[in-house]
Image (cartoon, rainbow, N blue to C red):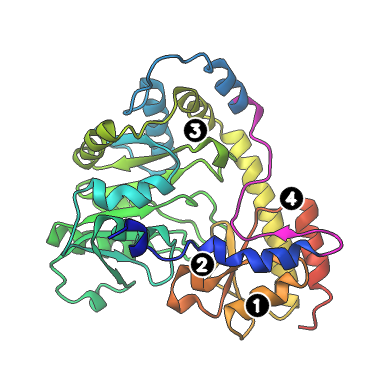
C-alpha cells in the first residue's frame, strides 16, 4: 500500500478555490489562513546567519554546544525548566518533529496516539505514518483504561483555538500518562503569546513535580522571531527520550544546518526583538477581534496564541466563502477536526496595512 493512501488530503490544497476568489478583490487578498510571518527577520539574526555561512563540514545532529546552551537558557527563562540534566535537540522546524515523533519513538500497529479534538492536523498524520491508531480526546475520563496509549499530545496555547490548559489539567495528564508508561508531548510553539491568560509549560516543576520523566516539549522560532523560512525549532525534556530521538535522527540525517543553528543562538538570546514582535501581534489582534465581533462573529477561547477562533452560526466553508468574497482568506475549522466545523481560524500574521484592510472590509458587513 502506498503510504500517501493512508493520509488525509493535504488541507491547504482544498483552500485554493477560496484563495482564487479572495485574490480577485480590487484591493488584493488579505491572507490570514496559513499564518505565515510577514515581518522582517531581526537584523542580528540575519547577521548571525551570514557570519556562519562558510560551513563546509557536516553539522552536528545534536546541535553545537552554543545552540544547546542557548536552548537551555531559554527554557529556563520562558518555561521555568531549571533542570541540570534537561535534554535538548534542535529540529528542522517543529512540523517535521511532530510528523516523525511517533515513528521515532518506535510506535507502530496497535499503539494509540491521543490528540485533542480540535488540533494541528500533523498530530494525526504522524500517528498514521507510524501505523498507530488515533484517539481524539481532551478528557482523560473518555479514554477509559486505554492501556495501549503510548503518546499523548497536548497543545497549549492551542492551534487553532488559542485555548490555554490550566496547570492542574496538565498535571493530571502527566500523572495519568506516567501511571501507564506513556509519553506526553507538549506543543508549546505559542507559549510566549499569552494575551488574557499566561500559559504554563509542561517543563515547569509546577506541572511535572520536579521530574522530566516521559515528557517532551516542542518549540519553534517561526513566529517568535519570524524564522519560518529558516526551519528552526527544538525539543526539550526527558534526557533519555531526547537521547532516543538523537540516535534515530543521526541515522536519518535529520540535521539543522550549521548556519541556522548559529541564527538560533542569536534568536533565543534576543528578547528585545521577540518582545517587539509580540507587541505587533497584540495590536493586530485587537484590530481584528474588534472588527470580527462588530461584523457579528463570536470569538471562542483565543485567550492566547496567534489566531482568533471565530464563528458566524454557519458551516465553516460558508464562512470561508463569505470572507473570500471580501478578499479575506481564512482557514476552515474542519481542517482541525470534526468539532471545528462551525468555526474558522483567523491568523494575526498580516501586515499592519493588510490587517487594517481586513477590518475596513469587515465594517461593511451587517453584524
Residue 356 seen in render: yes
Residue 343 located left or right of residue 96? right
Residue 34, image x and y in percent?
Answer: 59, 57
Q: Quadrant of the N terminus?
A: bottom left
**Residue 338: which quarter of the image?**
bottom left
Q: Secondary structure at mark 4?
A: loop
Judging by the rendered image, the residue that carries numbered circle 4 is 351
Judging by the rendered image, the residue that carries numbered circle 1 is 319
Task: Assess whether mark 2 and mark 3 are in contact (beta carbons under 8 angstroms).
Answer: no
Q: Secondary structure at mark 2?
A: loop
Q: In the image, which residues are magenta?
A: 25-44
Kindly report the distance in space between the C-alpha atoms of the residues bearing marks 1 and 4: 22 Å
Kindly report the distance in space between the C-alpha atoms of the residues bearing marks 4 and 3: 24 Å
| N-terminal-most mark, 2 or 4 | 2
| N-terminal-most mark, 1 or 2 | 2
Identify the residue at the far right of this view. Answer: 26
Amino acid at each position: 500500500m502506498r503510504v500517501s493512501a493512508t493520509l488525509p488530503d493535504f488541507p491547504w490544497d482544498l483552500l485554493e478555490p477560496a484563495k482564487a476568489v479572495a485574490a480577485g478583490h480590487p484591493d488584493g487578498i488579505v491572507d490570514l489562513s496559513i499564518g505565515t510571518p510577514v515581518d522582517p527577520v531581526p537584523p542580528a539574526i540575519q547577521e548571525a546567519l551570514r557570519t556562519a555561512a562558510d560551513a563546509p563540514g557536516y553539522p552536528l545532529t545534536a546541535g553545537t554546544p552554543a545552540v544547546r546552551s542557548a536552548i537551555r537558557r531559554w527554557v529556563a527563562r520562558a518555561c521555568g525548566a531549571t533542570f541540570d540534566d534537561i535534554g535538548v535537540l534542535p529540529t528542522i522546524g517543529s512540523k517535521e518533529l511532530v510528523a516523525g515523533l511517533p515513528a521515532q519513538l518506535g510506535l507502530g500497529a496497535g499503539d494509540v496516539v491521543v490528540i485533542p479534538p480540535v488540533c494541528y492536523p500533523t498530530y494525526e498524520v504522524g500517528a498514521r505514518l507510524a501505523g498507530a491508531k488515533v484517539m481524539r480526546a481532551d478528557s482523560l475520563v473518555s479514554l477509559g483504561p486505554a492501556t495501549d496509549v503510548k503518546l499523548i499530545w497536548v497543545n497549549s496555547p492551542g492551534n487553532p483555538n488559542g485555548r490555554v490548559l490550566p496547570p492542574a489539567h496538565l498535571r493530571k495528564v502527566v500523572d495519568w500518562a506516567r501511571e501507564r508508561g506513556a509519553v506526553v508531548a507538549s506543543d508549546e510553539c505559542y507559549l510566549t503569546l499569552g494575551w488574557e491568560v499566561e500559559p504554563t509549560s509542561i517543563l515547569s516543576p509546577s506541572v511535572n513535580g520536579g521530574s522530566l520523566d516521559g515528557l517532551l516539549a516542542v518549540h519553534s522560532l517561526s513566529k517568535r522571531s519570524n524564522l519560518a523560512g529558516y526551519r528552526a525549532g527544538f525539543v526539550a525534556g526527558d534526557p533519555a527520550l531526547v537521547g532516543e530521538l538523537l540516535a534515530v535522527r543521526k541515522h536519518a540525517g535529520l540535521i539543522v544546518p550549521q548556519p541556522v543553528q548559529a541564527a538560533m543562538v542569536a534568536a533565543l538570546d534576543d528578547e528585545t526583538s521577540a518582545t517587539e514582535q509580540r507587541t505587533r501581534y497584540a495590536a493586530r489582534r485587537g484590530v481584528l477581534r474588534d472588527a470580527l465581533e462588530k461584523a457579528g462573529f463570536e470569538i471562542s477561547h483565543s485567550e492566547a496564541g496567534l489566531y482568533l477562533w471565530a464563528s458566524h452560526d454557519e458551516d465553516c466553508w460558508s464562512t470561508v466563502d463569505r470572507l473570500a468574497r471580501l478578499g479575506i482568506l481564512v482557514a476552515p475549522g474542519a481542517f482541525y477536526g470534526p468539532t471545528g466545523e462551525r468555526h474558522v481560524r483567523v491568523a494575526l500574521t498580516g501586515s499592519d496595512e493588510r490587517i487594517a484592510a481586513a477590518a475596513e472590509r469587515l465594517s461593511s458587513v451587517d453584524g
